[in-house]
């Protein structure tokens, strides 16, 4: 008996064994966190008020998502059955892939893009097909369309995309839904508020389009884990089969309506970020740092071979930024989240300090 107990052990699926571990970057309270594309300031004060009124009953009972789903659906101009709230867009991606991807299927991914598509796809038995963007990192529309096969089951498009900040147009997305009628076209609008363009208007008329939205970015609620999928009722029905009925907790559900109502706060934050992005982009241009045009609350910059030193020195100067060098086609590139103008003037000072230090080190070598 003892021998069996020591030699036998549970073995996960081969696909899971092949998966890489995901290590989110660690933050520190004293640094300016420009590494995760969150809201860098705060959520609406109305959310704080509602949190203060949470009752014991709210905590003892299982959460009821349907009434809040109806509010969110109305906000998007949709019906409640067309919308499913999720524990962040990450859960949304997970359940969508679980519902639609099986052995022999293909997931089409324009790359570089958000890492979690690949992570959740690798937990299914489907194959990920990466469609590489050119050096300008624009949405690789032609290549993506050419890569559609009868096996394509899901196409995942982050719009705006991370880490590039580039976008696919409304017309391009419509065309992709037409060219792959047998596939779910997931348009992840996590950064919608900074871009201002959406394909939510197509829900109801396009049968294979699903849109994801998050409350982690402009709304400033990343810690609550709130996201959603919106799509045709027939597709949403399958998604709901695999979605836990209680994955969105009561606190998150209580906070969602005041967050949605406070459009003045959201508009103010987005305008602040867009102004700060313009300031930061001119500082980059002045410093001669190559950057990619961005429609989101972050900018991808070219640092080159010293990218790891750059990230390290920025951290020493009190600013966390994200090395994206291991993303396909992103060697030497670093992504910097845009916060408020005040925060970005600190980031600009850190940038100058860091570039000067790199120059000094380079000269000394
Ligand atoms: C494109 C994209 N989608 C989804 C997410 C994650 O959203 P959530 O916090 O709702 O899981 C991110 C986070 O960085 C993202 O960049």
Image: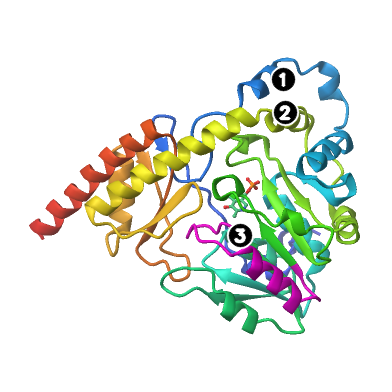
Position of 347 with respect to 7 (left or right) is left
Of the numbered discs 3 and 1, the one sitting upstream in the chain is 1
Residue position marked by numbered label 3 in the rendering: 158
Q: Residue at x 73, y 54 (%)?
A: 200
Number of marks in the rendered image: 3
Residue position marked by numbered label 2 in the rendering: 255
Crowding at label 1, few (<14), some or many (≥20) Cα neighbours within 10 Å?
some
Of residue 78 and residue 336, the one placed in the foreground of this image is 78
Look at the picture and state if 88 lies above or below 118.
Answer: above
Residue position marked by numbered label 1 in the rendering: 50
Position of 26 with respect to 178 (left or right) is left
Q: CA distance from mark 1 to mark 2?
A: 6 Å
| Position of residue 299 measured from the top left corner of the image (x, y, whole percent) | 42, 52
Which segment is the magenta one?
Answer: 159-184
Look at the picture and state if 95 lies above or below 171.
Answer: above
Position of 252 with respect to 141 (left or right) is right
Of the numbered discs 2 and 3, the one sitting upstream in the chain is 3
Look at the picture and state if 347 lies above or below 171.
Answer: above
Asked if the residues shown at circle 1 and circle 2 are in contact, with their CB atoms under 8 angstroms apart, the answer is yes
Mark 3 element type: strand
Mark 1 element type: helix
| Position of residue 81 measured from the top left corner of the image (x, y, whole percent) | 89, 49
Of the numbered discs 1 and 2, the one sitting upstream in the chain is 1
């Amino acid at each position: 008996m003892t021998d069996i107990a020591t030699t036998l052990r549970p073995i996960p699926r081969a696909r899971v064994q092949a998966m890489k571990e995901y290590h989110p970057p660690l933050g520190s309270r004293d640094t300016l966190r420009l590494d995760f594309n969150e809201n860098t300031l705060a959520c609406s004060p109305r959310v704080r008020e509602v949190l203060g009124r949470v009752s014991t009953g709210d905590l003892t009972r299982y959460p009821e998502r349907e009434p809040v789903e109806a509010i969110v659906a109305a906000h998007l101009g949709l019906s409640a059955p067309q919308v499913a709230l999720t524990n962040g867009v990450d859960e949304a991606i997970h359940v969508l892939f679980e519902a639609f991807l099986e052995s022999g299927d293909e997931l089409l991914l324009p790359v570089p893009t958000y890492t979690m598509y690949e992570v959740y796809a690798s937990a299914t038995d489907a194959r990920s097909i990466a469609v590489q963007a050119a050096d300008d990192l624009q949405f690789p529309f032609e290549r993506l369309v050419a890569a559609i096969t009868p096996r394509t089951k899901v196409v995942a498009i982050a719009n705006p995309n991370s880490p590039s900040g580039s976008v696919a147009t409304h017309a391009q997305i419509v065309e992709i839904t037409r060219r792959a009628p047998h596939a779910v076209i997931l348009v992840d609008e996590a950064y919608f508020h900074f871009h201002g363009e959406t394909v939510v208007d197509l829900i109801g008329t396009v049968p294979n389009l699903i849109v994801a939205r998050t409350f982690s970015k402009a709304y400033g609620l990343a810690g609550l884990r709130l996201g959603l999928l919106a799509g045709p009722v027939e597709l949403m029905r399958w998604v709901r089969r695999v979605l836990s009925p209680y994955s969105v907790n009561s606190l998150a559900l209580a906070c969602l309506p005041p967050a949605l109502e406070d459009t003045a706060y959201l508009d103010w934050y987005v305008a602040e970020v867009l102004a700060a992005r313009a300031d930061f982009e001119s500082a980059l241009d002045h410093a001669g740092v190559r950057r990619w045009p961005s429609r989101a609350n972050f900018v991808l910059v070219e640092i080159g071979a010293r990218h790891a030193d750059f990230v390290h020195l920025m951290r020493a100067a009190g600013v966390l930024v994200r090395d994206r060098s291991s993303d396909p086609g992103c060697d030497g590139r670093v992504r910097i989240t845009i916060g408020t103008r005040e925060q970005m003037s600190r980031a600009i000072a850190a940038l100058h300090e860091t570039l000067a230090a790199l120059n000094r080190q380079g000269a000394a070598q």
